[in-house]
Image: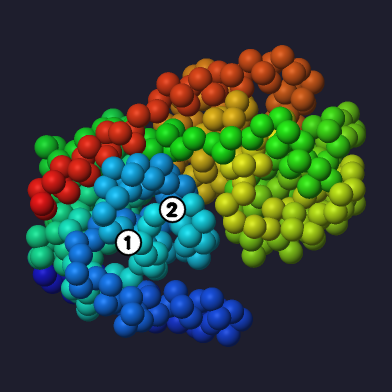
């Protein structure tokens, strides 16, 4: 079996060499990548390394924005119940790292996750020597997990899910994946389907639990009527103007949303569109699309207190989308018309909004199914259907209210995963003391 790890290391190294030219370009354009690259190579400041000498640490890995958001309630509860616990959080993406610094109160250190080469994994794990490693949503790193197992450090997957695409890809290398999964102590999965998939890949049945989705437990920021008014005023939006929010959009979706918005303006001339792209580096491209459609755009950080009739507001900051959903009248969540797999539709649902999304929701099938069952999840196939369903909701306030309440109730009824996940984590914490 070690030969498989050598092969994995070899191909990972080849990938890194192929990636090197793009990395050098990124480094030349921005210094922010230099810090993350050092951490990914296992090069840490000596002052940070020294912090791991005297305490048992718990290491929680949340790859990006969605995972960080999902674990926020868990981190808060864990630190409240174990105030002396030392907690290290790692991310892979820059946006995830930023959100972790903003949202994860009480965390002791936040770093970038190391590259999964054996030499780097060994060095970093020996340095931290965590009492427990927790990973959100089934990030499987073979070398890292093997190094943990060699030191008898338990690894726990929380909020685990296996999309249809990932399941298909993993099955191609099941002979290797089964060996990798043997290094994971517990699989805390979102749904029965996720549990069956991980077992089909080789996870031992006695290590698999179904606890639900942590994202149902993330309470939305409380926004009073007065706060909504302040937020509208800060965006230059009139009190009576309806707001259409397109959240977490990807390339290919912005064109559809903007064209739909332009059509909707004919019957709803006060309608304001707010776009929160999944990737902020795409804002210039979105601005060009808006200009091509004969519309004007403003970035949120530069909005003045002027009515935005016919204008599009572009969110250019991290971590604000969830709060903005509070003032929406109409919501579309992206990554779903483009074949990405969808994004978090529970955030707007928790505020009491029905949610429009495309057919590509493979990463959020459970959430989509729950909202669709109560009529609050509305799937659209493309531009024409988006316009039709948006018109229906904008024209009927009672329908919006009815479906929105159904969405909010569905979210509330499916809460509880944080408590069950915490119970699993605490069994491993207690075994260490």
Q: Which residue is mark 1?
A: 88
Whole-percent x, y for residue 62 in the image: 38, 55
The residue shown at (50%, 76%) is 33
Q: Image height check: is 161 above or below 394?
A: below
State the separation of the CA atoms marked 1 and 2: 12 Å
Q: Earlier in the sequence, mark 1 or mark 2?
A: 1
> In the picture, residue 122 is in which quadrant?
bottom left
Mark yes or no: residue 200 visible.
no
Secondary structure under tag 2 reads loop
- SS category of the residue bearing label 1: strand
Res 148 visible? yes
Residue 371 percent coordinates (x, y) = 51, 25
Mark on residue 409?
A: none
Q: Which of the pair 46/13 is nearer the observer?
A: 46
The foreground one among 193 and 123 is 123
Color scheme of the displayed model: rainbow
Q: Which residue, given by chain and number where applicable, does mark 2 sit on?
A: 105
Q: Residue at x 51, y 61 (%)?
A: 98
Residue farthest toward the front in the current orientation of the protein: 84
Residue 197 image point, x, y percent: 26, 39
Residue depicted at x 37% and y 65%: 109
Work out whether 60 lies above or below 339: below
* Residue occupying the point 28% across, 77% down: 49
Label 1 packing within 10 angstroms: few (<14), some (14-19), many (20+): some
Which quadrant of the structure image shows residue 259?
top right
Residue 337 percent across, percent down from the top left: 60, 42
Classify mark 2: residues with Cα within 10 Å, few (<14), some (14-19) or many (20+): few
């Amino acid at each position: 079996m070690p030969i498989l790890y050598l092969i994995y290391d070899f191909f990972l190294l080849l990938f890194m060499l192929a990636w090197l030219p793009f990395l050098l370009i990124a480094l030349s354009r921005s210094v922010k990548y230099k810090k993350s690259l050092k951490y990914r190579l296992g090069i840490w400041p000596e002052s940070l390394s020294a912090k791991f000498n005297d305490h048992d640490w718990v290491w929680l890995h949340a790859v990006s924005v969605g995972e960080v958001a999902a674990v926020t309630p868990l981190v808060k509860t864990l630190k409240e119940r174990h105030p002396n616990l030392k907690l290290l959080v790692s991310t892979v993406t820059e946006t995830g790292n930023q959100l972790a610094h903003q949202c994860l109160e009480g965390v002791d250190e936040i770093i970038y996750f190391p590259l999964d080469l054996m030499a780097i994994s060994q060095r970093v794990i020996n340095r931290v020597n965590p009492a427990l490693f927790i990973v959100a949503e089934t990030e499987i790193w073979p070398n890292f997990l093997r190094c943990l197992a060699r030191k008898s450090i338990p690894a726990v997957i929380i909020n685990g899910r296996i999309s249809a695409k990932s399941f298909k890809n993993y099955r191609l290398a099941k002979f290797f994946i089964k060996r990798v999964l043997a290094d994971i102590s517990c699989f805390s999965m979102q749904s029965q389907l996720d549990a069956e998939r991980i077992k089909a890949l080789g996870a031992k049945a006695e290590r698999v639990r179904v606890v639900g989705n942590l994202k149902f437990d993330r309470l939305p920021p409380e926004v009073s009527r007065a706060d909504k008014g302040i937020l509208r005023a800060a965006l230059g939006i009139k009190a009576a103007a309806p707001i259409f929010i397109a959240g977490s959009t990807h390339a290919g979706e912005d064109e559809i949303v903007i064209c739909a918005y332009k059509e909707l303006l004919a019957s709803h001339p006060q309608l304001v569109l707010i776009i929160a792209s999944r990737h902020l580096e795409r804002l210039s491209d979105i601005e060009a699309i808006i200009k091509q459609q004969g519309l004007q755009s403003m970035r949120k950080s530069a909005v003045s207190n002027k009515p935005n009739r016919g204008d599009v507001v572009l969110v250019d900051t991290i971590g604000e989308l969830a709060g903005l959903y509070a003032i929406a009248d109409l919501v579309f969540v992206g990554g779903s018309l483009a074949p990405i797999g969808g994004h978090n539709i529970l955030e707007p649902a928790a505020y009491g909004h029905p949610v429009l999304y495309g057919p590509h929701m493979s990463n959020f099938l459970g959430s989509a199914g729950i909202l669709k069952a109560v009529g609050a999840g509305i799937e659209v196939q493309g531009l024409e259907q988006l316009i039709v369903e948006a018109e229906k909701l904008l024209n009927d306030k009672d329908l919006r209210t009815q479906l929105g309440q159904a969405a909010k109730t569905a979210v509330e009824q499916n809460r509880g995963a944080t408590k069950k996940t915490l119970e699993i984590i605490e069994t491993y914490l207690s075994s260490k003391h």
